[in-house]
Amino acid sequence: TLPKKTKFDKIKHYVFRGKEDKLPAPLKEKYEQYEFANIELLSGKSPEKVVNLVAEKYNLSKSHSYLVVRECRSLFADVYGFTKASTRALMVNRLFNIAEKCIEEGDKVTEMEAYKLISQMTGLKYQELEKTDEVSDKMPHLVVVTNVNTNTPLTDVPYINES
């Protein structure tokens, strides 16, 4: 018989498919712990400091907090040894999902910020083609994403290489 899937396995299944917003309530709380730990690690805090912060914020034992941090690092690519490019590709995919949601909700400012981050992470650029009332003159509405080298419009995200 196959081993029973853990909460971590189930969360990983959702996250790797970009469906963390569809997590069932019991898994959502655990995912929030992972997300909090990841943000703290990315801000430069040591794993030991993050263990203490997780324990304090979520009222967990130190041993349980160590597990949260270890699983967090695994979930967000530390243990799996993802390359810089694949991690960047995952982040860009999430930003595109955010931009799509902003389009649906009519949030042009956040949409523009998402595309700006995509531009910085991929070497793609955006063109200012249209200004709207909701967006100030200093914040262009993003309409076209182009390849920096060829200046041609893109319909998909290309393979992102290591550089």
Image: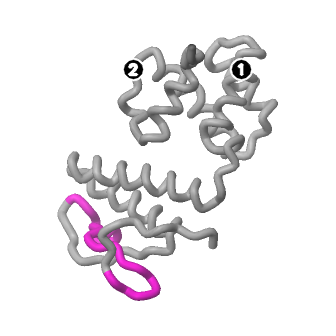
Q: Which mark is residue 101?
A: none
Mark 1 element type: helix
- Say if 60 sits above or below 31 in the image: above
Q: Amino acid at mark 1?
A: Ser
Q: Secondary structure at mark 2?
A: loop
Q: Which residue is mark 2?
A: 24
150 part of magenta stretch: yes
- Residue beneath the point at 37% across and 55% down: 96
What stretch of residues is rendered in magenta?
134-152
Q: Amino acid type of disc 2?
A: Pro
N-term-proximal mark, 1 vs 2: 2
Quadrant in the picture for the C terminus: bottom right
Q: Residue at x 50, y 53 (%)?
A: 91
Instruction: Count numbered badges in the picture.
Output: 2
120 sits left or right of 131 in the view: right
Residue designated by label 1? 65
Task: Name the spot of residue 68 as percent of width and height, x first.
Answer: 67, 24
Q: From what the image shows, is residue 52 above or below residue 101?
A: above
Density class for disc 1 (Cα within 10 Å; few <14, some 14-19, many ≥20) is many
Q: Nearer the viewer, residue 109 or 47?
A: 47
Residue ranking furthest to the left: 133
Residues at marks 1 and 2 touching, judged by CB atoms closer than 8 Å: no
